[in-house]
Amino acid sequence: MLSSNLRSLLWLLSLNGAVIAQEDVISSDDFFYGHSDPVYPTPELTEAGPWAAAVAKARNLVGQLSIEEKVNLTGGVTSSTGCSGFVPGIERVGFPGLCLADAGQGVRNTDYVHSWPSGIHVGASWNKDLTRQRAEFLGHEARTKGVNVLLGPCIGPIGRVVEGGRNWEGFSIDPYLSGGLVYETVSGVQSAGVITSTKHFIAQEQETHRLQTSSGALVESVSSNVDDKTIHELYLWPFAEAVRAGTGNIMCSFNRLNNSYACQNSKGLNGLLKGELGFQGWVVSDWGAQMSGVASALAGLDVAMPSGDGKWGGNLTLAVNNGSVPESQLDNMATRILASWFQMKQDQPDYPAPGFGMPADLAAPHEVVDARNPKARVTLFDGAAEGHVLVKNVNGALPLESAKMKLISMFGYSAKAPNRNNQELKKDGEFFTAWSMGTSSANNTELNKAFFGDLNLSTSAIAPNGTLVSGGGSGATAQNLISAPYDALVAQAYEDGTALFWDFESGSPLVNPTSDACIVVGNAWAAEGYDRPALRDDFTDGLINNVADQCANTIVVFHNAGVRLVDTFVDHPNVTAIIFAHLPGQESGKALISLLYGKTNPSGRLPYTVARNESDYGSLEKPDKTLAPDMYQAFPQSNFTEGVFIDYRHFDAQNITPRYEFGFGLSYTTFQYSNLAVSKTGTAVGPYPTGPVVEGGHADLWEIIANVTAQVSNVGDRDGKEVAQLYVGIPGEGVPVKQLRGFNKPSIKAGETVCITFGLTRRDLSVWDVDAQKWLLQEGTYSISVGRSSRDLPLIGTLDI
């Protein structure tokens, strides 16, 4: 492996900065042969552990199928339902098929479901218990609708590219935070019997060049060139947590991984996923991401979506019959599909028929299948509230006091609900309608053009036509109800007898000088198919400064689908408060007003770093874009030469002071930390794990080696929730200064103290050894830091291994 990694590193470095003549443009994929190590064959399923009974049942059923029937399982078909994809049934053996439906934030493009907070919002809550509750309700709604496979959660992209168009679907830029929340999400959704399709595997970190061109000169999807150590310590980390939680499905991505397409990358699928992580489920392609026939079958792809026609189907039958694909490999594929069906007990008679509550056309007469559980209301509200992050609050500007609010002025396009929240007919040239893809507040024409890879299109940084409760694309929620900030403020003002002025259109409105508070609500838009054009926009910044020039108490709120910079107005003396409201789902307005008036105490924390300037992010602000003439114009490259040094790890390594650091957030009360204690558990440890490979990796990777305890006191006058964070500094060269390795969110009453305990596992303290191909626990002194954020860590200790 050493020679392979050295070769890859030299190759990556050779790509940087070269000036190439047009005649040297690479025209054949052969140039990249060997950049991704081959791993064959696909590991077999094991009849042991939690999946033992399901695998045995699946093997028995597969033994009754013909080659043609097994092949039919491996490709999607058109159905009469509104499911995003459909695996055909085999009636004679009692298998009804599988309905696959978007997405990680809840069932999309249907009626009678809730609009839940998006991934970035869940990440900002830093709340594992709340994440689990959300997931259980997501699973319930999907099951009620006859969904077998919910196409989420999303943990890739992790957020390497700051302007990434799909960062909002995932939880956090940090693999530990993302991993902790995806574990709870997979566990919760699958507790309802619904298979999670954890996506996108792996290293699809930008939308630019995500698709192979379909017309004109052939341009392949971008290649994410990632070294072995980085992929393990950063991008694979949360997938290991999803597999450990038992995810029944993994979706492979559009991109190339080290110049081999992810859905036919044997190192990724056979080696990392089904080998190292012991994944027991099946791999489905993203829609259209299958790029070969025999090669993808041998590399570990199990199901092609939306169809297997062309590359599989009859051609896969032919390949099995002529020996190009062993029948044992086809059996492996079919067994994995059916094992997940048995594992989630979808074979039981009480599971709804596939797509039962997913009408193909909501405008046509259809049966009402109401999946909304009234008990979900508390979780919907708490989820919306806890994902808001208060980052500025000057002199107690918040919370607002009802008795003192005689007049409030509200401004900004993101304060009101969009003018339409309804299914519509497609217009000429449209592939998607606005409601179905979450673009009612944005520009649906823009999404339709950009979705399939138009790199010449100028896109918008904001959604100017109303408030945001989710981002756009296949990960959007189904808006069956929206509480917009303005609607909720009207209700509050009515109760308080407060006068309201508002202007949701002008960028330079007049402001009544007697306003007790001015609330400016903007947003930062992002969607599948294209990356964001910027981290700020002139219109919104101008609006904020214009209002602040006229109003001494200006409160800024952003519904942001990613990082949003604030330095053009943050130091304005009249900007008294700033809230990153993210993407709260349907309870958006109610949650915001509850926070503004102090009925709910803010407890969100940033799941990313907010810089002072774009340049602080270095080369990772924008996606890699390759246009002719260029040596790689037909094979765009994205070189992950920064390794694990993204977001706060980058800021720490480069000694850059952020505007708001990772993990930061304010409360209406004050918490103090004391009494740090670090103790080893006595678990015998060697340098490498020796346990059997179970779901997620070697079993002993999750053995707790040390415990860290600390006391957190609420010394303020309000009850509140604090996010206590643990960071570890691992000894050695070329490692981050510190890495998140624990978080806990207790609710603490005013005047009370609680004890927080963090368990550190072998995996938490290890680095990836590229020579041994195992996690290495080194001897040495580990720094232990506990506190409020990645840069506010009052408790410091050490752990000696």
Image: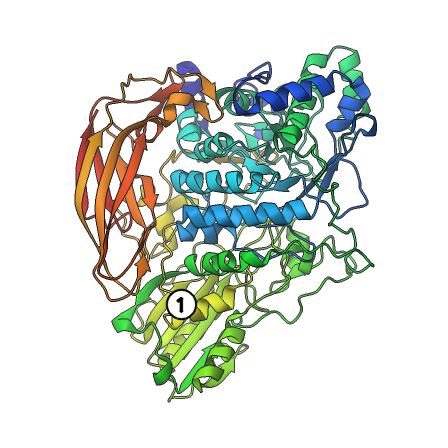
Q: Is residue 654 above or below residue 54?
A: below
Q: Is residue 445 above or below residue 213?
A: below
The residue depicted at 33 percent of the width and 46 percent of the height is: 744
Residue 753 position, x and y percent, is 22, 53
In this picture, residue 782 sits left or right of residue 362: left
Residue 532 position, x and y percent, is 52, 53
Of residue 367 and residue 248, the one placed in the foreground of this image is 367
**Quadrant in the rendering for residue 192:** top right
- Determine if residue 83 is in view: yes
**Quadrant in the rendering for residue 318:** top right
**Quadrant in the rendering for residue 177:** top left
Residue 168 position, x and y percent, is 50, 51
Q: Is residue 766 above or below residue 38?
A: below
According to the image, label 1 marks what residue?
A: 595
Residue ranking furthest to the top: 323
Q: Is residue 197 above or below residue 598?
A: above
Amino acid type indicated by mark 1? Leu
In this picture, residue 327 sits left or right of residue 120: right
Q: What's the colour scheme?
A: rainbow
* Label 1: how many Cα within 10 Å (few below 14, some 14–19, many 20+): many
What quarter of the picture does the C terminus occupy? top left
- Determine if residue 153 is in view: no
